[in-house]
Amino acid sequence: MILAQGDEFQNGMLVGIVPITITTEPGGIGGLTVCPHEEVLVALATYCLNHSRSFPEPSGDFKLGPVTNIPELTTIARAVVGKDVSALSDSIQQYLDDFSEGDTDRSDLDALLVEIAEQPDLPNSVKRGCPPAPA
C-alpha cells in the first residue's frame, strides 16, 4: 500500500509485483543508478483507496505502507501476475472502491478473477520481473 501522509489524498494500492532496483554501483544491473544520499523519485501506478478523499497529486506526501494480508486483495494480487490487466483498470478500481465500502461479496471477487484470467499474458520480458543476479 502507498499511504497518504494526511487526510487530503487517497491511499493507494499497488496490485501485483513491481521490482525496483536502486544501486550505487555505476552500470548496476536492472535498475536506477544513484549517488549515495541522493533522493530518487519513482512513479508507481496504483489503484485508489478511500473513495471519499481527493485523487493523489504529485504535491502529495506518500510513504510505502504495509503489504496487505487481506485474503481478497492478495487473491487479486496473485491473479494479475503475468497478465496484461490494462483493459481492466476500471473494473479493478470499481471492485476496490466497493470493497473499501464493504459493498462486495464472494461472487464479485469471483467475477473479477474470471475477467483477469481472460486477459492476455504479458510478454516474457515483462512477466519475469527481475533480471538474474550477476555471476
Image (spheres, helix red, strand yellow):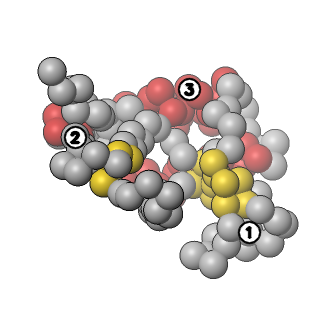
Inspect the image, locate mark 2, and give the three-letter code of the amino acid beneath it: Ile
Inspect the image, locate mark 1, and give the three-letter code of the amino acid beneath it: Phe
Residue where numbered disc 2 is placed: 29
How many numbered circles does the render carry? 3
Residue 35 marker: none
Tag 2 secondary structure:
loop
* Residue in the picture at 59% in, 28% down: 74
Residue 4 visible to the viewer: yes
Q: Are marks 1 and 3 in contact (CB under 8 Å)?
A: no
Residue where numbered disc 3 is placed: 75
Residue where numbered disc 1 is placed: 9
With 124 as the anchor, is 10 left or right in this view?
right
Question: Going from the N terminus, do you reach mark 1 or mark 3 first?
Answer: 1
Question: Going from the N terminus, do you reach mark 2 or mark 3 first?
Answer: 2
Tag 3 secondary structure:
helix
Return the residue found at the far front: 36
Real-space CA distance between mark 1 and mark 3, rounded to the nearest whole angstrom: 26 Å
Real-space CA distance between mark 2 and mark 3, rounded to the nearest whole angstrom: 31 Å
With 72 as the anchor, is 131 left or right in this view?
left
* Residue in the picture at 76% in, 47% down: 100
